[in-house]
Amino acid sequence: MSTRLKLKVIPGASRTAISGWLDDALKIQVAAAPERGKANKAVVALLCESLGLQRSCVRVLQGETSQMKVVEIDGLSLAEIRLRLSRTSTNNQDSP
């Protein structure tokens, strides 16, 4: 099973974080600059960490050089992705 997920990526942000949902797209901020694939690598790393997946399970399918991207995530349904991300954001809010 694999799920395609739309992303709105803000590169060069002050911090790397998942900002939440904009309609059907997930908004992500990354501190990495949008050069030589650095921002894309940061997006993949953040999603893997947040979802508890290996890097081989997440890949950018569309939008390599655009803020609007489509990623493919192996092994999770959209409902499971939303559940895991909601747990992550709850845990981040509880942190000092």
Image (cartoon, helix red, strand yellow):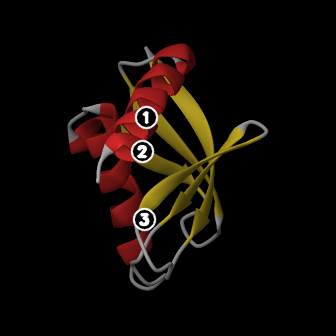
Name the residue: 47% across, 25% down: 81
Q: Is residue 48 left or right of residue 80?
A: left
Q: Secondary structure at mark 1?
A: helix
What is the number of callouts on the image? Answer: 3
Of 15 and 63, nearer the camera is 15
> Quadrant of the image for the C terminus?
bottom left
> Quadrant of the image for the N terminus?
top left
Name the residue: 44% across, 85% down: 35
Q: Earlier in the sequence, mark 1 or mark 3?
A: 3
Q: Is residue 63 above or below residue 36?
A: above
Q: Residues within 10 Å of mark 1 (few under 14, many from 20)?
A: few
**Circle 3/circle 2 CB separation < 8 Å:** no
Q: Secondary structure at mark 2?
A: helix
Of 81 and 96, nearer the camera is 96
Q: Residues within 10 Å of mark 3 (few under 14, many from 20)?
A: many
**Amino acid type, mark 2:** Gln
Of 56 and 20, nearer the camera is 20
Measured as percent of width and height from the top left, residue 29 is found at 51, 65
Q: Name the disc covering residue 40, or none.
A: 3
Mark pair 3, 2: CA separation: 25 Å
Mark pair 1, 3: CA separation: 25 Å
Q: Earlier in the sequence, mark 3 or mark 2?
A: 3
Q: Which residue is mark 2?
A: 93
Q: Is residue 21 left or right of residue 17?
A: right
**Amino acid type, mark 1:** Thr
**Amino acid type, mark 3:** Asn
Q: Name the disc covering residue 51, or none.
A: none
Q: Is residue 85 above or below residue 1?
A: below
**Circle 1/circle 2 CB separation < 8 Å:** yes
Q: Which residue is mark 1?
A: 90
Measured as percent of width and height from the top left, residue 22 is found at 74, 46
Q: Is residue 16 above or below residue 32?
A: above
